[in-house]
Image: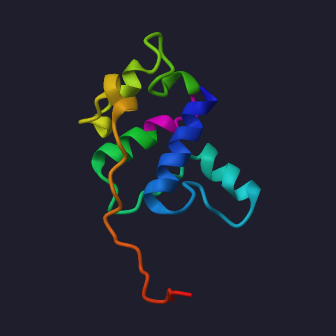
Amino acid sequence: RNDLWALGCTLFQMLSGSSPFKDASEWLIFQRIIARDLRFPEFFSDEARDLIDKLLDVDPTKRPGAGPDGYASLKKHPFFRGIDWKNIRKTRAPKPAVEANVCYLMSV
């Protein structure tokens, strides 16, 4: 169940580039966690907001994936729409959208 909390933090960080509960001290961070003071950037999709909000629920039993059906409920969340979970290990990673900047490289 703690892994589900960590997944929520990781998803937030990957999508935004910053921590979900960033503050000046650990004590203030803990206060924000307890108060559920979670501020989403405007560019987050509704699906991302919903999933992360649920994964960061203070009550671990309410997090998707923590119930009797295990990770099945997590995999069914709309954020993961379009993912073929049965064949995910066979899926190749997409090629980078941006080409490498080689303008400063010199041949030796």
The x, y position of residue 61, in whole percent, is 54, 21
| Residue 52 in which image quadrant | top left
Count of numbered circles on the image: 0
Q: Quadrant of the C terminus?
A: bottom right
User: Is 45 on the left-hand or right-hand side of 25?
Assistant: left
Colouring scheme applied when the structure was drawn: rainbow
- At a point 51% along the width and 42% down the height, the residue shown is 8
Instruction: Give percent across and percent down for residue 62.
Output: 49, 25
- In this view of the protein, which residue sits in the foreground, 34 or 54? 54
Q: Is residue 50 above or below residue 27?
A: above
Q: Residue at x 44, y 42 (%)?
A: 53
Q: State which quadrant residue 58 falls in.
A: top right
Q: Judge whether 79 appears above or below 22 on screen.
A: above
Residue 72 visible:
yes
Residue pushed farthest left?
Answer: 82
The secondary structure that most of the magenta stretch takes on is: loop
The residue at the far front in this view is 108
Q: Which region shows up in magenta?
A: 54-59
Decide which of 29, 92 is in the foreground and name it. Answer: 92
